[in-house]
Image (spheres, rainbow, N blue to C red):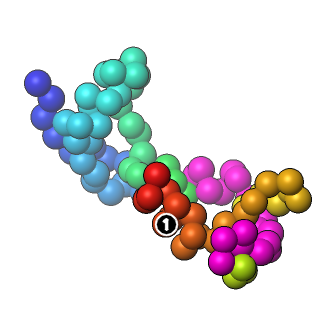
Amino acid sequence: MYEDKTLVCKDCGNEFVFTAGEQAFYAERGFQNEPKACKECRNARKNATRGPREFFTATCARCGGEAKVPFQPKSDRPVFCSECFAQMRANG
């Protein structure tokens, strides 16, 4: 039903592809307008408004190693390093 479309980014002027899958997603969500900017420009705009992210250091509850997390750890909740978190997630 949908076919890939080539659009021009309003920010950088480069062409980008609005894929059939993206078009189906937009239609499913009820979005009326096509994207005006390429993914790189959309991400750059999003990151510019967020500001720098603050990371906190904690001790991993599983392996005891250092864990850097984007939230203030609480003493009543365990914190895991990225490797342990990924293993736990993979194991369900």
Residue drawn at x 28%, y 53% as measured from the top left:
15
| Residue 51 versus residue 38 in the image, above or below | below
Residue drawn at x 37%, y 54% as measured from the top left:
13
Q: Is residue 57 magenta?
A: yes
Q: Is residue 78 visible?
A: yes
Residue drawn at x 55%, y 58% as measured from the top left:
44
Crowd class of label 1 (few under 14; some 14 to 19; many from 20; radius 10 Å): few
Q: Is residue 52 left or right of residue 15?
A: right
Count of all numbered marks drawn on residues in the image:
1
Of residues 55 and 80, which is closer to you in this image?
80
Displayed quadrant of residue 35: top left
> Looking at the picture, how far across and down is residue 53, in whole percent?
73, 63
Q: Circle 1 is placed at which residue position?
A: 87
Query: What's the magenta region?
Result: 45-63
Of residues 83 and 24, which is closer to you in this image?
83
Q: Is residue 3 left or right of residue 74?
A: left
Displayed quadrant of residue 7: top left
> Looking at the picture, how far across and down is residue 86, in whole percent?
50, 65
Q: Is residue 68 visible?
A: no
